[in-house]
Image (spheres, grey):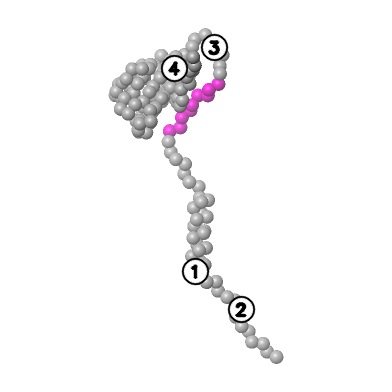
Amino acid sequence: MKLKRTKLLVEPPASATSDIAFILIVFFLVCASVEPDKGRAQVLPRAEPEPQKDKQSQTIDVELTRNAVILNGNPLPPETFRKSIVLKLADKTRDEDKIVAVKSRKEVPYSHWMTVTGIIEDSGGIITLQLEEERTVQVK
């Protein structure tokens, strides 16, 4: 007896191929390596307690406002800041003496902050950021 052969292979529906392609695209986008954001690498000094040294270094304080730079309490326009910071850092030889504490107000644009910190680094300073001030409050 001869049996009739029927086609047993069934093709998948055409709508499934677009779903599979979409899933593969999402998979490769998630797994693909993304180039990291570019920026200027900064080396921040560690905050480790050190014993008192015979010569205590004086930290340079820089505070940024929207349109000016305050260097150790003296407001300067951005044009004269470069000369002033170069003079302050010129006679310093040790790394501990070259630390510049940068304080920034909320309204300071990012481009102004990048310009000032770039000037400090080009002058040989080591930038440290002051995020919060500690204050002692006496209750009477």
Residue at 48% from the left image edge and 46% from the top image edge: 34
* Element at label 2: loop
Q: Which residue is mark 3?
A: 52
As displayed, is residue 27 above or below residue 107? below
Tell me the number on the disc at residue 15: 1
Q: Residues within 10 Å of mark 4 (few under 14, many from 20)?
A: some
Q: Which residue is mark 4?
A: 59
Mark 4 vs mark 1, CA separation in Å: 68 Å
Closer to us: mark 3 or mark 2? 3
Q: Which residue is mark 2?
A: 8
Mark 3 vs mark 1, CA separation in Å: 75 Å
The quarter in which the N terminus is drawn is bottom right
Q: Residues within 10 Å of mark 3 (few under 14, many from 20)?
A: few
Q: Are marks 1 and 2 in contact (CB under 8 Å)?
A: no
Magenta region, residue range: 40-48
Q: Amino acid at mark 1?
A: Ser
- In terms of sequence position, does the residue under pointer 3 or pointer 1 come before the other? 1
- In terms of sequence position, does the residue under pointer 1 or pointer 2 come before the other? 2
Give yes or no for residue 15 being in the magenta stretch. Answer: no
Mark 4 vs mark 3, CA separation in Å: 15 Å
From this viewpoint, which residue is outermost toward the front? 140
- In terms of sequence position, does the residue under pointer 3 or pointer 2 come before the other? 2
Residue at 52% from the left image edge and 8% from the top image edge: 54
